[in-house]
Image (spheres, rainbow, N blue to C red):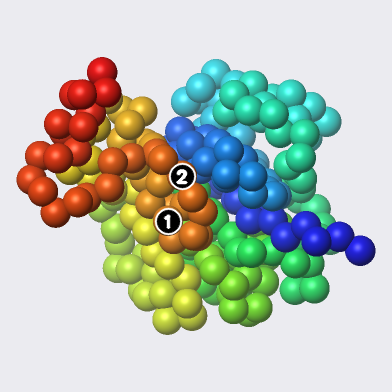
Amino acid sequence: MTDRKPWLVGITGASGTPYAAAVLRGLIDAGEDVDLVISQAARLTLLDETGRGVRDKHWQEHVGTWIGRDVSAVRYWSAGDIAAGPASGSYRTKGMIIVPATTASVAGIAAGTSKDLLQRAADVTLKEHRRLVIVLRETPLRLSTLDNLRTLALEGAVIMPASPAFYAGSTDVDQLVDFMAGRVLDLCDVEHDLYQRWTGTLGAARMAVSLNR
């Protein structure tokens, strides 16, 4: 018997692999158990955006190099393995984060098609009433996508567009990415220090960043 209860992170083929990397780093740094599923399309996006590929047989080396962390405690599941642990409701997880999420994955999850492990795991997360955070990276949005997002929201999913804010004093793209990752971790009650929180004082975050330089 094991007490392991991971956060399942699903990565789809939307642009925005830095968001996925930042969320993974945040979970690992917080000491959280992590399961990982990377869709076939996400591998192409990762290769395009970072020049790095991920192969199932060498996933630990490839993912570890990509996010700059020891991933020996991470459990990796192939997206084509529909019989994997997360495909069953009896497999214990804290919930699932899909980052970034494509409109196609949103449509598949809303319709319950379970075309791969990522979609099936999201389906399981909803039916077991666990936390599902969907970090959508697409703009503008078609009516059909809005309808699918509404369906998922009604079932309890948290819809989180990848829309970084500027009040936290960010001075570069990495800090904007970390802001989004931090907001995702907030929704999962995971401790982090990825961004300056709003205190109610105008310019406080900007001043804090300047003092820390």
Residue position for label 1: 186
Cα–Cα span, label 1 and label 2? 8 Å
Q: Quadrant of the C terminus?
A: top left
Q: Residue furthest right?
A: 1
From the top left corner, tell me how far across and down residue 14 is, in percent. Answer: 46, 43
Residue 51 found in image quarter? top right
From the top left corner, tell me how far across and down residue 179 is, in percent. Answer: 34, 42
Q: Residue furthest front?
A: 211
- Kindly state the secondary structure of the residue where label 2 is placed: loop
User: Which of the two residues, 119 or 32, is positioned nearer the viewer here?
Assistant: 32
State the residue at coordinates (51%, 72%): 110
Q: Which numbered mark, 1 or 2, is in the foreground of this view?
A: 2
State the residue at coordinates (36%, 28%): 174
Q: Quadrant of the N terminus?
A: bottom right
**198 sits left or right of 30 in the view:** left
- Kindly state the secondary structure of the residue where label 1 is placed: helix
User: Which circle's residue, 1 or 2, is located before the other in the chain?
Assistant: 1
Q: Which mark is residue 192?
A: 2
Q: Is residue 191 above or below residue 24?
A: below
